[in-house]
Image (tube, coloured by chain):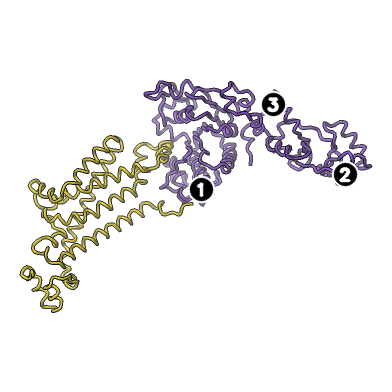
Chain colours: A yellow, B purple
Amino acid sequence: MHTAALAPVLAQVEIRDRSEASCISQNKFCPGWIIDNFDRYTDPLAQHLYLVVTSVAIGFVIAFVLALIARRRRWLVGPLVGLTGVLYTLPSLAVFFLLLPITGRGNTTAIIALTAYTLQIIFRNIVLGLQNVPQESKDAGRGVGLTDRQLLWRVELPLAIPDIIAGLRIATTSTVGLATLAVFAGAGGLGEQIISGSNITFKTGVVAAGGLAVLMAFALDVVLLIVQRLLTPWRRVQPA
Amino acid sequence: MKRYPGQSEPAINDLSLTVPAGEICVLVGPSGCGKTTALRLANRMIELTEGDILIDGESVRRRPAAELRRGIGYVIQQIGLFPHLTIGENIAVVPKLLGWDKKKIGARVDELLELTSLGTELRDRYPAQLSGGQRQRVGVARALAADPPLMLMDEPFGAIDPINRERLQNQFLRLQSEIRKTILFVTHDIDEAIKMGDRVAVLRKGGILAQYATPEELLMTPADEFVEDFVGADRALKRLSLLRVRDIDLWKAPLVRVGEPTAKARAAIAEADLPYPLVVDTAGRPVGWMSARDLARETVPQQPDTAPKPILELEDVLRDALSDLLRSDTQYGPVVDGRGAVVGVLSVEIISEFLSSPEATMHLTPAAERVES
């Protein structure tokens, strides 16, 4: 039905394989096509990864600083959760379009918007992680003569790692999904292969791009899980 | 003095006491009496509102709090080991803060693991892998790491089950007899206070000192009704826990040997405190009591009618000895020395006389030697 739109794609395929060409022309899901055309995904994939990692990293740094401020001034926790919550609920497309006149098309706009979405989850989890540190460990830490800063870095933060990484995992996974919209900010990524041009009607292309996003989310999740296990050896011991 | 904002009554008011170096001073009292507050004022976990605390003549306010605390051992009921650090790293926390070199820290950690009978094989485990009793000892080892002259212990055995608590208390007293720290010890348990303390400070609500005395004095002469109630109606029995058989005067035993003429036994009775001769073997070990029927024979029999039970030792705690005596038929028992030879006889009568005599306090045994094994 959309053969006109698919013409350039078909032209590439037709030469090789009749059955694959008919798969494409009927707009079914065609794995062979993905294998043949994988190189058109490498750049968007790298760009997508760049957007996700950069946004989560910046989001982590900002949320971390906010959490440390809120640790000292407990009353700030509520307002900060509210503020980051507002950012979280803004429709992402709207944010992209609102930012376009200010920051222009490109990575900056995309990263600002994506970072804003990570803040809420990461901030809440760092605060939660610090709150979950056993009171007696803090009391003993102070009692043996740790200064406030030493207590934070040597006791509280290490013990908060599981909660912090849990936050990073959720933030990363959702950012991988959200980043498919970065194409509207002119920042490319896998979304380009889903939305731009006529691809949105090309089932195999959409599935390939979407599948890669899912795989990326899964891979990043596994990486974070491994990092957590390496950072928290005490959680893997057999209790007495 | 410690006053909390918004409270008309201070949490601690006019509490003044001196703890001699190398002794265990126990703060005891009902909940809400301010004993933990008093303890935490000493290492400035809580800041004083008024007054001062001097350690070795120096005010606790002179140094920054964190620095002060590094020089004071701190043990709390919840122990508060750092779950993410190994046992060795937990113990090494203060030496690391003080900037000791690695080798010295390693040696100190091993030394403390041995001293607290934990064993160096626990060094690389995590707290979650240890039993409650082991964790408690790691807590003590951590507090001792930098060899502080003063230790603060807040219900250190409070989270341990009664059987292990007893064992850990004894072990700690044995340790203390070697290390001789000055210890401020908080508990709500009067029995623990009497057992652990060289001196006991009984506090009442508002942190008011009701009595500050040795455990003996506390049991013998409670300062007022509050202290009397607090130490309990069984304070006479509690005093017996503080003493050993060797601490009181025993009866002289009428000793005879197997095969000797009974005439000699009759003569022995005449000089002795009790009417039954005690038959001993050649090494002086008790064989049995002679009955009236035994006395009617020519010579002292090899198997006297009554077995010499219970046999007590000089090192036995008096309360346990009394319990043994009450369970036996005779209500008296031969007391033997380390080699098993009879040195005298203990009876229920001696103990009850002892408890009613005012000089009983003279027999106070220093805490360090009171340690049971």
Answer yes or no: are tags 2 and 1 on the same subunit. yes
Work out whether disc 3 and disc 2 sit on a shared chain.
Answer: yes
Q: Chain of mark 2?
A: B
Residue at the spot x=91%, y=42% of the render?
B260
Most distant residue in the left direction: A4
- Give the residue at x 29% y 40%: A68
Dot 1: element: loop
Which chain is indicated by disc 1? B
Task: Name which of mark 3 and mark 2 comes first in the sequence.
Answer: 2
In the rendered structure, find residue B258 and report the number of the disc placed on it. 2
Mark-to-mark CA distance, 3 and 2: 37 Å
Query: Quick check: B252 left or right of B141?
Result: right
- Tell me where residue B126 appears, x and y as whole percent: 45, 50
Disc 3 + disc 2, Cβ < 8 Å: no
The kind of residue on which mark 3 rests is: Ala
The residue at which mark 1 appears reads as B131
For label 2, the crowd category at 10 Å Cα-Cα, with few meaning under 14, some 14 to 19 and many 20 or more, is some
Q: Name the disc covering residue B360, or none.
A: 3
Q: Image height check: is B116 above or below B186?
A: below
Whichever of callouts 1 and 3 sits on the residue coming sooner in the sequence is: 1
As drawn, the residue found furthest toward the bottom would be A18
- Nearer to us in this view, B88 or A188: A188
Q: Residues within 10 Å of mark 1 (few under 14, many from 20)?
A: few
